[in-house]
Image (tube, helix red, strand yellow):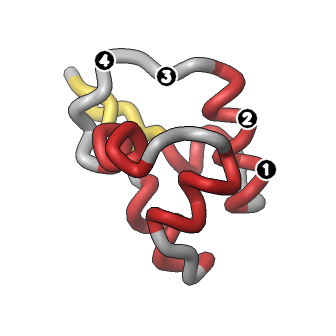
Amino acid sequence: MEILVNLDVMMARRKISSGELAERIGITPANLSILKTGKAKAIRFSTLMALCRELDCQPGDLLEYRP
């Protein structure tokens, strides 16, 4: 089982760059890259809320469970 991160898909839909999104939500571009590539082991709710706010989406749009 795995959790897929669809952050890159949502960013493309909203036409926002990694640098701009990182700045808006208050994390480093390197940490955003770790989230985008699915290498993160955890995500803070505050970061998830900021991503949803800036990308105008729901957590389920960013995270997907695959058995």
The residue carrying mark 4 is 41
Taking the spot 33% from the left edge, 44% from the top edge, the residue there is 30
What amino acid type is highlighted by mark number 2? Met
Label 1 neighbourhood size at 10 Å, few (<14), some (14-19), many (20+)? Answer: few
Q: What is the three-letter code of the residue carrying label 3? A: Ile
- Residue 1 pos. (x, y %): 20, 21
Residue at 24% x, 26% y is 2
Instruction: Residue type at mark 4: give it.
Output: Lys
Q: Residue at x 49, y 73 (%)?
A: 17
State the CA–CA distance, disc 3 to disc 1. 15 Å
Chain-order first, disc 3 or disc 1: 3
Residue beneath label 1, please? 53
Q: CA distance from mark 4 to mark 2?
A: 17 Å
Q: Which residue is mark 2?
A: 49
23 left or right of 5 in image? right
Question: Is disc 1 placed on a helix, strand or loop?
Answer: helix
The alpha-carbon separation of the residues under discs 4 and 1 comes to 22 Å
Determine which residue is flagged by label 3.
43
Asked whether disc 2 touches disc 1, contact meaning CB atoms under 8 Å apart, the reply is yes
**Which label number is shown at residue 18?**
none
Residue 50, percent from left and from top = 72, 41
The vertical placement of 15 against 23, above or below, is: below
